Amino acid sequence: MSDWTPTSWRAREAKQQPTYPDVQRLEQVVAELATMPPLVTSWEVERLKEQLAEVAQGRRFMLQGGACAERFDQCTADIITNKLKVLLQMSLVMTYGLKRRIIRVGRFAGQYAKPRSSDTETRDGLTLPAYRGDLVNGPGFTEAERTPDPERLLRGYEASALTLNFIRSLAEGGFADIRHPEYWDLDFVEHSPRARDYQRMVESISDSVRFMELIADAKVSEMSRVDFYTSHEGLHLPFEQAVTRRVPRRRGWYNLGTHLPWLGMRTCDVDGAHVEYYRGISNPIGVKVGPAMTPDWLVALIEILDPDDEPGRLTLIHRFGNDRVADRLPPLIEAVRRAGRRVIWCCDPMHGNTELTSEGIKTRRFDNILGEVEQSFDIHHELGSYLGGIHFELSGDNVTECVGGARGLAEPDLRRAYESRVDPRLNYEQSMEMALLIARKMAAMNGRHS
């Protein structure tokens, strides 16, 4: 692509970008970031792309999960460890149900910027810039907090680097001992009518792990390294430009700020700046597909973003909502099939199921999230397609942001531990219950019983 450079997006309309009072300082920070070491490596990116190609062939499955928007003050050992733990345990349960290897992709180490429906927010007659994530400004409703600050880009890079360093250390050291079910926090299953089924599943997984260790005469953690890949919405284009590099002995350009950047619905205009940026990087990329997406629009995006139909290149993350997925998803699957394209289909059951409580608190209902996942499996199966991934917003801690689940969290419970500044997440128990239910669904579809 001789007509593409990391800055060619600047000639297009760029949506969802903050307005910085000090543009000169912004450009200085971008230049400084461009000299810093990359956060990930090209061989990690290429390894992920190879594994995603196996997802497209129906041989693997991707579990993507993490915070809606990371916070600088939550770049701590406990929070990072708990995120990895829940992803690992969910992936083991899904492996049990699907009988396929799981790729673990976290929404972490860079998910610091968020799109907003409005550029401003008004309270009591005072209008200030909207909070766009810690990468841009602060959540406090003051002029000082809400003014976009270029220095935050440096802080975002530092927090991402610290997170990645700790993740790699944990992954190399076998941080989560999965051999014993007593290390799994499953107290919530006592409140579920499927309690005994859950316990049998976890015991079976643990027995399988012990058997593998007995045969191999080694701990599972010693047999192979557990991989965790990173992902975030590549929203803030000056930051993404700064971490885009050439790599010796490889063709093209790589975004070395994450393994898997994705493109949101608000910024996927065919002629827009974000699509222009994404078409030129060599990473595997995701595209969020919402209710407004038409078959023609989707096919046009695929032709721009993946002109060579490269295996593992493009993941379509559909997010319609439990009440709309049955109508909106089939035409898109059929359009991609008619175009003869190989893509990875992934279900995001979170964003289409967001609602407000009577008190104006954002939440999501467990049953609606599960319902969209189950419908998506059935729709892909009926159309001869393969649902190759699930994309969750979740926490490794027991926050109270989504209602429902085995413990029956209700709207009054939300105030007890509601920590998200943007969108609500499944907590640890709800995430594990979701994984167990999805494993049952997978096993049933494969003609097996858990």
Image: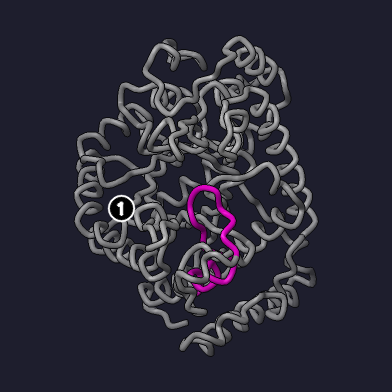
Q: Position of residue 417 (x, y in %)?
A: 60, 64
Which quadrant of the rendered structure holds the N terminus?
top left
Q: Residue at x 45, y 73 (%)?
A: 404
Compared across the picture, whether 51 is left or right of 182 comes to left
Looking at the rendered structure, the secondary structure element under dot 1 is loop
Q: Residue at x 37, y 58 (%)?
A: 355
The answer to which quarter of the image holds residue 372 is: bottom left
Q: Position of residue 104 (x, y in %)?
A: 57, 54
Question: Which residue extends farthest front?
Answer: 124
State which region is magenta.
417-436
338 relative to 80, above or below: above
Compared across the picture, whether 150 is left or right of 329 comes to right
Q: Is residue 322 magenta?
A: no
According to the image, what is the colour scheme of the structure?
one colour
Q: Nearer the viewer, residue 246 or 419?
A: 419
Q: Position of residue 288 (x, y in %)?
A: 38, 42
Q: Nearer the viewer, residue 132 or 121?
A: 121
Examine the rendering and report whether any part of residue 378 can be seen. Answer: yes
Compared across the picture, whether 166 is left or right of 402 comes to right
Examine the rendering and report whether any part of residue 58 can be seen. Answer: no
Q: Is residue 435 magenta?
A: yes
Count of all numbered marks drawn on residues in the image = 1
258 relative to 365, above or below: above
**Badge 1: residue crowd in 10 Å (few <14, some 14–19, many ≥20):** many
229 relative to 248, above or below: below
What's the amino acid at mark 1?
A: Phe
Pointer 1: what residue? 320
Q: Residue at x 47, y 75 (%)?
A: 405
Q: Residue at x 56, y 31 (%)?
A: 146
Q: Position of residue 310 (x, y in %)?
A: 41, 35
